[in-house]
Image (cartoon, rainbow, N blue to C red):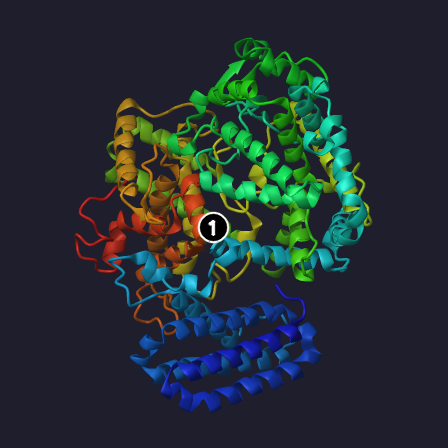
Amino acid sequence: MVTDTSHTLRNTSGTLKGTLDTLKSTSHTLRSTSGTLKGTSDTLKSTSDKVKSTSDTLRSTSDILKSISNTLKGTSDNLRSTSDTLRSTSDALKINITLALLTTALATANEVKASSNSNDFHTVTAKQIMLLAKSAEIRNYMKTDINACDDFYNYACGNWAKINPANNNGKTGLFITLTNAYDRRIARILMNDTQDGRRENKFHPKVKYFYESCLQQTNQRKNNYRKNLLNIMEEFGGMPAVKGKNWNENKFDWITTIARIFAKYGISIIIGVQINADLTNNEINRLYVGQIDGLTNGKSFEYYNQLKLAWELDLITILSLNREQSAKVADEMIEFAQKLALGVADPNEGFDIADETHLKLLDEITEIYGSSLNLTHFVKTWLGYEYKLPVYEYVENYLRNLRILLKETPPRVIANYIMWEMIQYFRLELEGDNEEEQRTKCVGATKQYFIKYLDHVVYQELLKKDPTIVQEIKLLWQQLKLAFEDIWKSSDNKWMKESTRDRALEKLSAMSFEINNYADNDFEKEFASLTISIQNYFENVVNIMKLKGENYRLKLFEPPSLEEYQLRSCTPAYTSEYNKVMLPVAFLQPRFLWDNVYPAALKYATIGSIIAHEMAHGFDDTMGKYDAKGNLNNWWDRNATEVFALRKECLRQQYGRHRYAGKLLTKTQSQGENIADNVGIRIAYAAYENWSLKNVDKSEYLPHMSHITPSQLFFISAAQVWCTDLNNIWQRIVVNTDVHAPEEIRVRASFANFEAFAEAFNCELGSAMHPHRKCVIY
């Protein structure tokens, strides 16, 4: 994660010194030891300077040392905020723990310095420091003065917000931490000139040149940036807000305009177009025309208010509109965008794909909605020829709402919205950013266009460092499947007919698992026609978008494949049409979730529960209707459907009684994520129990946590996957737009429904985490 080891070590020693200063001010007892600790810190600083000359050897250990530094810094913050608690605890123990960490850090530095194998983390000392660091990290986030049976989220995550406050970043959490670490890996790859075997290809330089052109664009954009954006818009008639009286409304046809934009750049505006597997026969592709997925719920007024303020400022800085004009244009465009989103099928109200898609000829759809929404013309303009095969009308309510919106909206407003939406794909603001911020944004831009290749390269790097990692994950997958199979076969699921249960087991058996490594992709061939210049970022983006537009049309004649937005996901996913769980490469990064050195409880509780959550989606209220082959084919018997509906209703009522940001959660019809949370934790814990029975001789304890049982460690680790902090604005936005329950509710509700949790923590029946009535799906 860091490229300059000596710099990292200096930061480490500085952080340790800061930790000691904080400890000194925390209590009188710690003051008496500060001289000793400061001396230790100075020793570390001295060691850092000496080790500088051997930075190449230490480079591979810098991630561990940085982790230790961050952990100790977190300890410092935590101790500062809880000084009253520290005074009442054993000061001597705190000192001993800190000294042990410092001593072990020194020992590790000396040992690795002398080692000829810079990747050897298997020495006794290295293992000890990793265990100490993980123990300290887990304990830092915990707030043990809270009763676990009253509020387990705050027991496990009560100090997260103090150590990792959201502030202006909106949100902090494990998935964001993983993504940031992953981005740092990508940055190293893009900045590294090493000519190893993986990158000795004609495509890698293109990706590298794109990244470098991004970094250079601050010098390029001063004179050309606005002009380039205006040229892109002018090709499609221009933006009325910019052209003023020179814009010709009589020449503007909105549906032709968006079809031409989609044909050239593959950008969907107002009308969504997807090429996906047929719902009932996933061996062929179909067109899905209608709703644009990803639009934010039109009822989220907080989101659109914030977006309006952002657009006002952007119109001034990017297109040089005056303040009065930008306010008017932004207000009109936001009103249109929000009304458009009101037609989107709300996933919280229960999105049934079978009810929202209808296979029809384009002429039939056009006849229904009239000439103002001529989808026959739209598709013909896009493809360049008449398309005669049936297409899926995707979300009828969206198209009906759009037809009404078009009648009541002036063409000038529609044109402004179309042009503004289009140029968002060509924007990247770097002015005013420092060098690190610029690199971060340019890594994000490079990921946006070349994520599959970057995932592939990172995967190869991780595999080279630890060839067993993939085998270990796949073994975990098999263990989770066996545990879920046992759950299906248990007497608790006898409410389902045997024939229906056999279909469930058939689907589970056929379910596959994949790490997004793209080993079969021929990137040189895929991007052979792409021209990338190190001198012109804007032109590079234009070339990439043109290639995207060309390639998307060709998908109609290719076998079905996963949509790019699914592949680019930074979180694991279950795809119903392929009956497959997919894990992003980012989750293979070592020591964030688990390591062979750690107790197995951590592996099953973190990566295990995450994968199990996706596995459970195959049997939720929406994707459970797909069969083992990934076709929409409801295999549930009538009685099972009715019982499942009652169990789902139990969850709906239960989650609706939880409060977040001062309000009760909405009792939504869709319970897919809540079902996956509740079932997933059961699968992961069952798999861990099976492992424990076969490995009774293995130690399942962390240093300074001997009072925590293995089962308790499992639930603490599983909860800390969801430790999160959101600022007030994002709390109000997320609660209205996210299909997931807020993270703290995900922990409280799913754990409270699980008898094994109550047993692990000896919770009294009737307590918050051990209610009399529990909601159980499987």
- Local SS, label 1: helix
* Residue under the point 60% across and 22% down: 410
Tell which of 153 and 331 is nearer to you: 331
Vertical arrangement, residue 120 with respect to residue 774, above or below: below
Specify the quadrant of the image occupied by residue 59: bottom right
User: Hey, what amino acid is under mark 1?
Assistant: Leu
Residue 525 in sight: no
* Residue under the point 37% across and 25% down: 635
* Residue under the point 53% across and 73% down: 69
Specify the quadrant of the image occupied by residue 702: bottom left
Vertical arrangement, residue 390 with respect to residue 350, above or below: above
* Residue under the point 65% across and 18% down: 379
Count of numbered circles on the image: 1
Vertical arrangement, residue 287 with respect to residue 45, above or below: above
Q: Is residue 225 left or right of residue 778?
A: right
Q: Position of residue 105 (x, y in %)?
A: 53, 79
State which quarter of the image contains the N terminus.
bottom right
Crowdedness near tag 1: few (<14), some (14–19) or many (≥20) residues, C-alpha within 10 Å: few
Vertical arrangement, residue 423 with respect to residue 86, above or below: above
Residue 660 in sight: yes
Q: Position of residue 49 (x, y in %)?
A: 66, 83
Q: Position of residue 665 (x, y in %)?
A: 33, 42
**Residue at numbered disc 1:** 475
State which quarter of the image contains the C terminus.
top left
Tell which of 633 and 642 is nearer to you: 642
Tell which of 246 and 272 is nearer to you: 246
Q: Position of residue 92 (x, y in %)?
A: 35, 85
